[in-house]
Amino acid sequence: MAGRGPGTSKVRNTTTQRGARKAIYEGFMYVFHREKKDGTGWRCDQRGKCLGRMTVLPNDTVLDEKPHSHPPDWGSCTAQETVQAIKRAAETSRATTVAVVQSKIARVSDKTAMKLPKFRNLKKMVRRVKRRDLPPEPKELMDLEEIPRQFRTTLKGDRWLLHFDPEEDQRVIIFTTDKHLRLLARATYWVMDGTFKVAPHIICQVYAIHAAINGKWVPLVVVLMERKTRRAYDDVFEILKTETRRRVRRELAPEKVSTDYEQSAIQAVRAAFPDAEVAGCLFHFGQAQWRRLQEAGLAVAYREEQNEAMRTDFIALAFVPLDDVEDAFDALSEAAVLILRPIFQHVEETYLRGRLRARRGARVRRRGPPLFPPHLWNCYERTVEGLPRTTNPCEAWHRRLLSLIGKHHPSFFVFLGQLREEVGEIDILITRAEGGFSPSKRKTSLEQKEIRIQRIVDRYEEYKEDEDVLTYLRAIGHNLSGFF
């Protein structure tokens, strides 16, 4: 084969694991040897075992070659190219580690598959590539003295890091842009919620504040919290108020705030925004009742069809006008089967009238305030006004973030990198919403359920006049079945 003359096949260039130059040609792999007058010299990668050589012209065609002492190995060559393709994808792709690997190996031949590294090693390689340009990972938040420069601005160069003080006792890291602060100040209704699953291991939770832009809910503020204390939430809202005045000369004054039932967050919202109406999440309300059933050992009993209907009837109390909730609860309690009475007592004490307490020297016991009073979990007015009854906009975004990152509790800087890229997509959503694009349509089944609930709520006064509120609750409850 020596002196065979210029070839017609192109040489394909690649690299070794350490980044050295490598070439592939007709089933053989070569490593760089030396530069020659008439081209680049390459030798077989099986050094010491094979004397195969070739000279390659600048246009990647072969000028001459010396024979190999072994047959070609197309599987290994293609596997080498596949590994390099995975590396290149890892450098630019936003996909998860698993998705990057799978996208490149999905169509390889059996011979190539046999020559590829193990799947777990390919994933490790992708993670190394993704982490290559990141700072050293802090073991604790107190080890972080500053946020690296690349994470202080968005990919477009806009100021993004709002607040981080390493000297604080309860550290919070707040990310938002000036434009997002203006939109937050303009919004009258906020939806807030936190998540633990996607939080990096050195923080307690990722907390997001969403607002609607022409009907499209988007996260405008993201907070990384070291602790979930009242003081930490107080700090977050005071910083937001102060920085909004300083940066965009606006006041934060939401009229309504929807959140979960975490007392620290609720109390902090009320202190920071005393004129705002705080509303609880209907989904969390239903979930709390189900957990109470499990704690009381009544989950099995509640799975029976009649009792399950009673559970959703109770959750439907949230759709009764606030002034009528106690009467509706009393009617529902009288109709409940005996086994469920303890749950109704818990609901009455925790969510409606408060617990009876005996005061020293007093003959009559009086009720203290309920932990979660009706105005917190009632959603009748929100339904009438077409406002969200849950924190689902936040939770949907948390799920999206988790799917993009691909694992629970990612490393801190991997999380920041993904969040920084996500801000770019958020800005696109905002631009489209401001430009008049319609928000994404809900699933048909959910839309139909929403329409049915709205129709029933619109007829509440008819049910009340007929003294048939239990039928109203059952009608709403039918549409809540399977939701919690």
Image: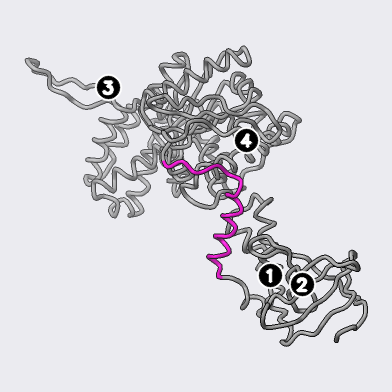
Task: Describe residue 374's horizontal placement relative to residue 212 as left or right.
Answer: left
Sequence-earlier tag: 3 or 4: 4
Sequence-earlier tag: 2 or 4: 2
Image coordinates of residue 306 in percent, x first then y, are 34, 50
Image coordinates of residue 12 in percent, x first then y, are 80, 68
For the magenta stretch, what is the residue range? 118-139
Sequence-earlier tag: 2 or 1: 2
Q: Kindly identify which residue carries mark 4.
A: 150
Image coordinates of residue 253 in percent, x first then y, are 53, 16
Which of discs 3 and 4 lies nearer the camera? The answer is 4
Residue type, mark 3 in image: Pro
Secondary structure type for disc 1: helix
Q: Kindly identify which residue carries mark 1.
A: 80
Secondary structure type for disc 3: loop
Q: Residues within 10 Å of mark 2 (few under 14, many from 20)?
A: many
Q: Kindly identify which residue carries mark 2.
A: 24
User: Is 249 rendered above or below residue 169?
Assistant: above
Q: CA distance from mark 3 to mark 1?
A: 69 Å
Q: Residues within 10 Å of mark 1 (few under 14, many from 20)?
A: many
Residue type, mark 4 in image: Gln
Residues at marks 2 and 1 touching, judged by CB atoms closer than 8 Å: yes
Quadrant of the image occupied by residue 230? top left
Q: Kindly identify which residue carries mark 3.
A: 369
